Image (cartoon, coloured by chain):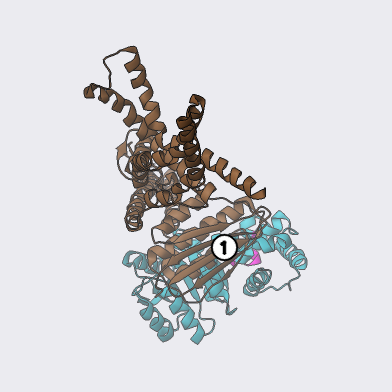
Amino acid sequence: MRHTDAWLRSTGRGLVRSTVLAALAWGVLAVSLVPASVAAVSGSPWSWANPWSWIGLLLFLIPLALVLARPIGMLSRRLAARWLGVTIEDGYRRPEDAPQPVLLSTGYWWNGHSYERSRRDAELDQQWRRRIGDPAYWRDVRWLLVAAVTLGPLCAVPAAALVGAVAAFTRGTPVAVLGGVLLTAVSAASAPSAWRLLGPLGQRWLRLPAGAAAAERVRELELERAEMSTTQAAELRRIERDLHDGAQARLVAVGLSLAAAERLLEADPVKARALLQEARRGTSSSLAELRELVRGVHPPVLVERGVVEAVRALALDSPLDVRVEAPDRLRLDGPVEAALYFGVAELLANVAKHAPAARVQVRIRDRGTEVEVDVEDDGPGGARVVPGGGLDGIRRRLGAFDGSLAVSSPLGGPTTSRMVVPCASS
Amino acid sequence: MRVVVAEDLYLLRDGIVRLLEAYDHEVVATAATGPETFEALIGHRPDVAVVDVRMPPTNTDEGLTAALRAREQIAGLPVLVLSQHVEQLYARELLADQAGGVGYLLKDSVFDADQFIEALERVAGGGTALDPAVVTRLLGRPATASRLARLTGRERSILALMAEGLSNAAIAGRLFLSEGTISKYTTTMFDKLGLRDDDNANRRVLAVLAYLDDTRG
């Protein structure tokens, strides 16, 4: 009794699943046949006898297939995972990997690939490049074809046989009844196994191919390069603006004051003196501005002492209670040091913003082939990496050196951010 | 005073030398690299030295290192360190030996010649001269905030000037108060902070800084 029950259940379930898969595999074809069939019935020039009119069918089929390929691919993978426990990497390019477009001084937006008139255009362009250029998308299109000729016919067997059997039974002749019994047997026998084909087929056709890993790596590096070019462009623009509006403007004012003082030197010494003082104040404030600018570009302590001491200096200047645990002498390549330094600076600034009373522990460890920097605070937690946000910025910056950022921040804290950069320390 | 000037940029070195000579100080030697600085400091034993932090050959903190090494050999050798940027880290290193005779100022400070020379003389006399930017950061420490909170606003501004290395008279001059008032303030202030009051400006600075360092963490 229990056996029969289980058998019935697995057959029923198999029947449903096989039918779903058949519909999935043939859905696009079936839908695009609808207008063509309607046309054939209503007597338009479209007819099966005229191969030229098949172009009409293709006009429906191709766009529909291109639009639905990705959803169908995703659904197939999800079904494989749910029914068979088979996980198939989708390998899609993720939108958050793409660099943020930057406004250049020319007024155009640079998205790492092309110059566009507006931010929206730059993002759209990027989105299309990502979608169309994604090999994973074309794998989905291929899957549509593969599924239509393999999964479709095989998974249609149980349902088709059952329909056939019902039709035969209704006819009632002995031969038809015999055929009906046979068809029922075929349906029942194929139902539990037909849908399982999704596993091997999916793994063969939907998965990242072996060589793709290397190709993806190359592409990732290309993306990182595009990324670097946009961040550099943004950075240069910021520096240019700061110099232009700050120090440069002030020095012009200083020059003017000096010129005026020169003229007034004999006629009105008191006023000339005031102008000279003004000029001196002007040079002082331009120096202060330049100092800030330099600190933001490449902090002098970093040049003079290296990353460990620079992080110590950062800890001293932070409004937080920061402890630093680090090896005494650790020098890395300049750009790597800068990336780690600005990472720590950003993390400390984040803590100061969201948990001003927190105690922070910074740990720098040299693991030989990689350097690990932990920043841990006992704040309320809940930090997340938001695309375009500060943490994302660190991640991108470290990405250029094959480094990574991992953030663990459960609600209630503590928050631990770990930056790892592979390198041989010198 | 006999002064050694260590600065790698010719224009700035020349400017400082001219400034010192205008104030009737004698420049006994100039240096443009780290090793030269060390030799000049040891060889000439000047009354005070003006040293730039960043110098060749490595263009890192050669000047600072040379000054620190020279002070290891000649305790309390007066050194005024100049830099394009000030770091608490360096200030702490300079003050660590507690020997006094230490200055640490931004290069801009030469713009105000009178104050610069005054600071130089203070350092030569075994006192201290710290840039206000460093002092603000030193006093801005979070761990000290709670204790500093006991001080009134006026007391805190006096403490800041004291940490720069000014004497009571100089503080009185800056704040337009009488020297007597200042010394009253300092007495209550040191009481509140639990420090020993002392008339020696240098020892006061060191006391303040040691106190700030103690409360760290």
- Where does the image place residue A228, in percent across and percent down from the top left? 36, 52
Q: Chain of mark 1?
A: A
**Crowd class of label 1 (few under 14; some 14 to 19; many from 20; radius 10 Å):** many
Principal secondary structure, stretch drawn in magenta: helix
Locate the C terminus of chain B and report the quarter of the image it occupies.
bottom right
Q: Nearer the viewer, residue A83 or B15?
A: A83
* The colour assigned to chain A within the rendered structure: brown
Q: Nearer the viewer, residue A243 or B128?
A: A243
- Where does the image place residue B1, in percent across and percent down from the top left? 46, 76
- Where does the image place residue A303, in percent across and percent down from the top left? 41, 67
Residue at x 46% of width, y 82% of height: B70
* The colour assigned to chain B within the rendered structure: cyan
Q: What segment is highlighted magenta in the picture?
A: B164-172
**Callout 1: SS:** strand
Residue that numbered label 1 is attached to: A375
Residue A16 lies in the magenta stretch: no
User: Can you see residue A71?
Assistant: no
Q: Which residue in the rendered view is the most extreme toward the top?
A: A43
Residue at x 44% of width, y 56% of height: A291
Q: Please identify the quarter of the rendering in which residue B65 is found.
A: bottom left
Residue A49 lies, with reference to residue B100, above or below; the image says above
Residue A268 lies, with reference to residue B185, above or below; the image says above
- Judged left or right of residue A211, residue A275 is right
- Judged left or right of residue A114, residue B44 is right
Q: Please identify the quarter of the rendering in which residue B101 is found.
A: bottom right
- Judged left or right of residue A382, residue A41 is left
User: Can you see residue A332?
Assistant: yes
- Where does the image place residue A227, in percent across and percent down from the top left? 37, 50
Residue A150 lies, with reference to residue B75, above or below; the image says above
Q: Tag 1: residue type?
A: Val
